[in-house]
Amino acid sequence: MKVVTLGEIMLRLTPRGFARLVQAGEFEARYGGAEANVAAALANWGEEAVFVRKVPANELGQAAVNSLRAAGVDTRHVLRGGERLGLYYAERGADRRTGKVVYDRADSAFALSRAEEYDWDGIFEGAGRFHITGITPALGRNAEAVALAACKAAKEHGAAVSLDVNYRSKLWGKERAAKALEKLFAYVDVCIVNENHARELFGCSDERTLAERYNFACVAFTYRRTQDALHNSIWGSLYAGGERVLSRRYEMEMIDRIGGGDAFAAGLLYALGHGFEPQKAVDFAEAASCFKHSVEGDVCFASAEEIAALCSGSGGQIER
Amino acid sequence: MKVVTLGEIMLRLTPRGFARLVQAGEFEARYGGAEANVAAALANWGEEAVFVRKVPANELGQAAVNSLRAAGVDTRHVLRGGERLGLYYAERGADRRTGKVVYDRADSAFALSRAEEYDWDGIFEGAGRFHITGITPALGRNAEAVALAACKAAKEHGAAVSLDVNYRSKLWGKERAAKALEKLFAYVDVCIVNENHARELFGCSDERTLAERYNFACVAFTYRRTQDALHNSIWGSLYAGGERVLSRRYEMEMIDRIGGGDAFAAGLLYALGHGFEPQKAVDFAEAASCFKHSVEGDVCFASAEEIAALCSGSGGQIER
Amino acid sequence: MKVVTLGEIMLRLTPRGFARLVQAGEFEARYGGAEANVAAALANWGEEAVFVRKVPANELGQAAVNSLRAAGVDTRHVLRGGERLGLYYAERGADRRTGKVVYDRADSAFALSRAEEYDWDGIFEGAGRFHITGITPALGRNAEAVALAACKAAKEHGAAVSLDVNYRSKLWGKERAAKALEKLFAYVDVCIVNENHARELFGCSDERTLAERYNFACVAFTYRRTQDALHNSIWGSLYAGGERVLSRRYEMEMIDRIGGGDAFAAGLLYALGHGFEPQKAVDFAEAASCFKHSVEGDVCFASAEEIAALCSGSGGQIER
Amino acid sequence: MKVVTLGEIMLRLTPRGFARLVQAGEFEARYGGAEANVAAALANWGEEAVFVRKVPANELGQAAVNSLRAAGVDTRHVLRGGERLGLYYAERGADRRTGKVVYDRADSAFALSRAEEYDWDGIFEGAGRFHITGITPALGRNAEAVALAACKAAKEHGAAVSLDVNYRSKLWGKERAAKALEKLFAYVDVCIVNENHARELFGCSDERTLAERYNFACVAFTYRRTQDALHNSIWGSLYAGGERVLSRRYEMEMIDRIGGGDAFAAGLLYALGHGFEPQKAVDFAEAASCFKHSVEGDVCFASAEEIAALCSGSGGQIER
Amino acid sequence: MKVVTLGEIMLRLTPRGFARLVQAGEFEARYGGAEANVAAALANWGEEAVFVRKVPANELGQAAVNSLRAAGVDTRHVLRGGERLGLYYAERGADRRTGKVVYDRADSAFALSRAEEYDWDGIFEGAGRFHITGITPALGRNAEAVALAACKAAKEHGAAVSLDVNYRSKLWGKERAAKALEKLFAYVDVCIVNENHARELFGCSDERTLAERYNFACVAFTYRRTQDALHNSIWGSLYAGGERVLSRRYEMEMIDRIGGGDAFAAGLLYALGHGFEPQKAVDFAEAASCFKHSVEGDVCFASAEEIAALCSGSGGQIER
Amino acid sequence: MKVVTLGEIMLRLTPRGFARLVQAGEFEARYGGAEANVAAALANWGEEAVFVRKVPANELGQAAVNSLRAAGVDTRHVLRGGERLGLYYAERGADRRTGKVVYDRADSAFALSRAEEYDWDGIFEGAGRFHITGITPALGRNAEAVALAACKAAKEHGAAVSLDVNYRSKLWGKERAAKALEKLFAYVDVCIVNENHARELFGCSDERTLAERYNFACVAFTYRRTQDALHNSIWGSLYAGGERVLSRRYEMEMIDRIGGGDAFAAGLLYALGHGFEPQKAVDFAEAASCFKHSVEGDVCFASAEEIAALCSGSGGQIER
């Protein structure tokens, strides 16, 4: 099934090992972003994934496109132009030292792009799903309008719309976020949201209330408990058809904290696209999230078989 | 005591840190192989260790020889010729992501070498022990014949023969392995085998049965429980003189999963060569194995004093 | 214009900096091969480039595919299966120390693939050009048959066929090479060959003789003079329509010696595809070759604008 | 003598070795900027160098400050606040492949800072010299006002003002640049300018005309000829007291192309501060510039003794 | 408050990752030493920190000075001369493999410096505190005399003196250490000591006994339990004004074991300088120590806000 | 032929690429020394090379031994004990920036070893040649006595003695050097010396005078002209049997400047050991020296075939 995603992709600069940003004499360079990570994971698993955005017509924009193409993502609808590629610095935490993200993403080519630049008909031709996150409307008026236009076009082309709330307090306040997201909710079929954000933004402590209030076909909640910078536990829920199921809970020793939620979203879309039962769906999604935390970079570099094996309880033995 | 080992040595390519193979822009290059690792550990501990095999007459063959010489192994009996050095790619696992080994070792110079190329008399002159693993006969008809010839020559020169079963399902099936190994068992004094392989290949669930069936002087079983990719527990047993002793059990946080069994074998040979009592012998062997898991690469880079200190219960404090 | 290429892609392992192979504790990992490099360069320049071969269904095969996708190459027709990805070790030379290539490419998945595995109709549908090199038939009987089948299919679908002789003495002898290549010549429109190989394999010291003997529409000769490992001079010729033109001659200080001929071939195909006059065509091809020598890796990572600028005589100033 | 400099400092991201930006999996991180480089060179040579600007109150701003402090620069007058640290990507060229700089410096904390934020009296107390470049007013209205305020304050505190024109076509057009710079010229005693920019912006082909038109006490021209990306020749002139002297000309094989002009400026300020004769002054400045081209990074990491030794004709022998 | 520290600074050479010293093909280079680490931490937190010692007048001495300047330490009173910079090799441990420090610090420029070389009046002008550790007198007769002279001068200038016992068995015996330290105790107000060293050197098992015997205003004990090379628990006590308070206890997963005690000392000095209550003081000190263990290198690279946040119980969440 | 060498081996610390020492965040670690380099080159070429010295009984001493064993050198006569391994920092130069060596080698285990610690009879049993350089007696009284004892023992066992003057002004003055070396000359058969040192130390401008004065069987002069830090020209002479021959002259672009003289010495010993004619001998020696300059590290990692090929005029072409 063709899945369209639209959103930002940024250069991610990470110091080597556990070096702090002020100690860093070199940075690992990777490219990622919430929706881009979803597209890359889906492509890794053999899905037809289309990623849409605007990147500057320079070497950095090209490198971002190349990284998606390497994963098998269809980037034909990426626009070129504008001034800059957004970027962020990610410092890995350890023990009680908190991981840190410093954003430098204002005024990116995508954030300033306009809805009419995109060829919505070409983009959504034959698309079965469209995925977006709350980060896109958080990037400013232009990006909000692009997000809205994309949701509308998706619906008109018969694609199911999924939205991951992905609230970022460094980008906008709760009230503004809730207001903007509610405009998009009108088009949304599947809503993914962290349990705390559901409560803080929309006053909903459970999946059912949220689903009913906004008329979502499915709602998935993600849960995370933080023991320290490298040890978290995660699990998820899925509410669909009046029923709520909970995934297995993973106590993790993490390699890379970023992109776990995007892997959950990708896993859920994959599962829904393949007609998995709710329990199997949320288990696949959570296994994808767990797996991602053991992989460097934003993207869940794994095969669908590896995720399925993790669902079946394997994990950790050496294969030889 | 002069210990002869015969077997494969390969180039091992490992991505940096926790990168997956598909993400790797560079590989760490090390050289190792089951029997070579045993020889290097013994040489590290001051033993006279001779390693025998055939390597191609090119830069890669030379680099493999150099790595053994650096550890103090006597490589005068390594032959030159043939087409290629075998290699394998080793992806480090983390959390529930399984470590991976991709072999590319078919048709190596050693696998295609013939028994008559080796100077068995020179090799075994003055040798007290000969060590081999089940990987060598798994490499093909030629290597199987070389293994058999070596065992025979060892016996003729009065060397005690030890064999580590080291079953690899990617190389051969259980039935074929059992059959080939049983041919070698006729010459074997000391047999080392993972508990599961003892049962699956030879239907023996305990050391004594195995020892009696094949008339081994000693049998050591190795045990491993996998919590996740970086956390395992290991212990071992030794059956000798009608008695069975168990080593201490180690709960490990591992740095490098590969070569742990080879360090056990080396530790056992060292202990037997120095006339350790069975309990002390299996404790030394298991301590060597535990220590190896905390060292990068295939080889147990440690001094005999460090292994002995670990046996005595030390470990973890900084020395300064 | 859609350009199809068929051939090998290998893992290239290069020691850091100027380290020799026996000194190397790590290798840079890149993926390349003569025809793959042509495809990647063309894709970099915006052409529709399709690359066809078989890779093993493992992580290394996937990484090779990803590297081509990153460059924008269409890899939908790459088959999966077989045992291994070929590889080669490349030691960079310096001053009078000769650069070295150690091949380990026998029995690769591609070399053992059979002509009937490929979907020739799908591959050549709408193709304007097909490109192959002399390395492919050198890989063995199977690969030779695949090469022949591909040339036939290309012709049947109306694609112009180009062949780069690319003689490698480590792969086969001159006589056998000449014989095998002559079988392919029946389908070839554009022949590219190093001046020495033209003489040594086919006894032709000039382009015209070669063109007339084998009825080629175009013949390009490449010339190289070696001052030392990092300083070469190169130029090229093009014989077409009864006329011979010579490119500008470049005295180069090289960063990476490998892939220069492939960049020439890609440049020539690009030029012919865009209808450049012979002089402009050979100049563009030689500029691409020169540019490649200043880029790390096998592939000419450059834009068509950069090649054109080099043709116009620019080069070396910093842009800021 | 206390020398005050005011200007931008940016994160510089450089791919390893000769990798192109689109190939880069990691970047070396350094901090530099035209005026910051001058301050660091002077501090290296034992001068009291004060650097003034505004950096964001985050880890990147701190790292920029640390890098200057390491060189011995006084950073007490650096303000904290604003949104972002400017950055640029620098791709090293080779042979005919042009080096590339991609700027991402718009809306930096410094570019948006206002003149009244700075404590001009504290900054210039006891200062003998003030140095600025044409890049600062090119950053926008705010920065232009800051530059003007700084020049005025410098004059009021009796400091001699030097200005390096440093025209950057990617930042502004020639006409706008000329106009803005002429406003600053009213305060300038020492003007440094590339020969071409002198002609293109101010229509002056020689030092004397420029000095007389704007009433400069000294004018230095810098000359550069580009053979290729790694080979340039450079020399300089100094016009002072009615006389023009030319420095020695250096044919260079360069390690790092960036910061050569800043080293010239620093060398000239050092020479003038120590009362060198014009010939010795321009020779010292040009030697500093030459030396810088052999050092990685923006800053001329060298001692004053090393520069003096280069002036005396030494260079290249190993010291041991 | 101006805090003066006096002591050694050395080059620290650390193999990459978990490599053992005999495996290391490269070393990370950092500069540190007990008192230098205290100075750098205090400067990181905004204190005026002065570091005093002698370094050789070569590139290594300069690099050591630069590293302190980068952290904001005032190095104006560092002397230049003598023969060599001391150095040490630090091998990171893992699991039961013990971390190792190999010193090569004899006859350093500082160890051989004489008390009369230092400008004590300039150094202590306006100083509120002076800090030293037991390592300095352990370096030899000269260094012992320098330590004594510094303590005297500190007292004469009204600075409170703190001493961290920091006993190192590789440098001297217990008896000699106790004797030398007792000479310094006459000037000491604040004594920091590991519980075991308090007992083994001075026969004191509790803080009060030590405080009363030597008339210290404050005594802090540090406690450490070692689970393995990467897992320790630490806590501390503070005895002041007749009362003893205990800090929170931290179970840590460590990144870098070295410098934890220095961070405790810095934290205590910071707390005392800011008039924290004893409980808050020891909590801040221990939090600084805990934080340091999660940072690479000897120095606690952290802001005072980060330490305070850790005291308040936060830790481990990602900030974005 | 068994060749014994005796001398120092040190840790060499080299910043990455062209970084200066004060910029270095990491060092490449290699082990080398004048006589050790000779031994390693000879072992690379298949000779039986024995290296004698004392190293500390710690990890650094072991690493130095391992590096020689890797090259195939016999290290059985290396003593263990003493305090430290000498080391040096080597900064690579570029263009007119001079390469730099900072020594930290005083009081090494070898420099303080005593002649009676060595088993001279075991060392020289069956030895055909003994090689030493002027660096050894420069290390102090003990080392001078060791050098003398070794020369005597060599002579008594019938080994030919070769000495490379290798004058280092940072270690001793010319007068003291001349005096100490003349004591050794009584035992020397083959003397190698830089043309300038021959004149400055012994007042000899030509080989013959030197040979006759000290009764040397052979004298080789080495010549070097320095264009810049990376471009030198070198050639050599050999005076033997009343005849003087000159080698080919090499204009080099160098990768690593250190160890070129040691490669010349090794080449000469190899040539003399194989009975080459004088012209062929000096050509082989100079080719070895030239080759070494293109290899990273102190040691001439090359095969005898590669040196011979360079003598025959090849060089620079890629082999594939």
Image (cartoon, coloured by chain):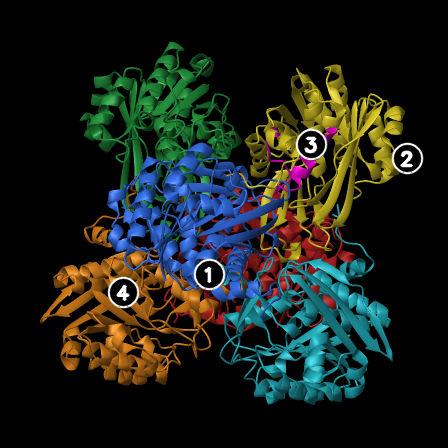
Chain colours: A red, B orange, C cyan, D yellow, E green, F blue
Q: Amino acid at mark 4?
A: Ala
In this rendering, the count of numbered labels is 4
Specify whether disc 3 shares its chain with disc 2. yes
Is mark 4 in CB contact (under 8 Å) with mark 2?
Answer: no
Q: Secondary structure at mark 1?
A: helix
Query: Of all residues shown, which one is farthest toward the top?
Result: E156
Amino acid type shown at disc 2: Gly
Tell me whether the residue at label 3 lies in contact with that at label 2, contact meaning CB atoms closer than 8 angstroms. Answer: no
Nearest to viewer (mark 4 / mark 2): 4
Q: Are marks 4 and 1 on the same chain?
A: no
C-alpha separation, residue under disc 4 versus residue under disc 1: 33 Å
Given this view, does label 3 or label 4 mark the residue nearer the observer?
A: 4
Q: Chain for mark 1?
A: F
**What is the chain identity of the residue bearing mark 4?**
B
Q: Secondary structure at mark 3?
A: helix
**Which class describes the residues within 10 Å of circle 4: few (<14), some (14-19), or many (20+)?**
many
Give residue E64's position: percent from left, percent from top.
Answer: 47, 33
- Amino acid identity at mark 1: Ala
Q: Which mark is residue D35?
A: 3
Q: What is the CA distance from the residue labelled 2 to the residue labelled 1?
A: 68 Å
**Disc 3 to disc 2, C-alpha distance:** 25 Å
Tell me the residue that label 2 is attached to: D203
> Residues under labels 3 and 4: Cα distance?
63 Å
Q: Nearer the viewer, residue D32 or D281?
A: D281
Q: Which residues are magenta?
A: D282-304
- Which label lies toward us, 3 or 2? 2
**Residue B271 included in the magenta stretch of the image:** no
Q: Quadrant of residue A1?
A: bottom right
Above or below, comparing residue C7 to residue C91 in the picture: below
Residue C35, percent from left and from top: 66, 74
User: What number is the disc on residue B49?
Assistant: 4
Residue bearing the label numbered 1: F271
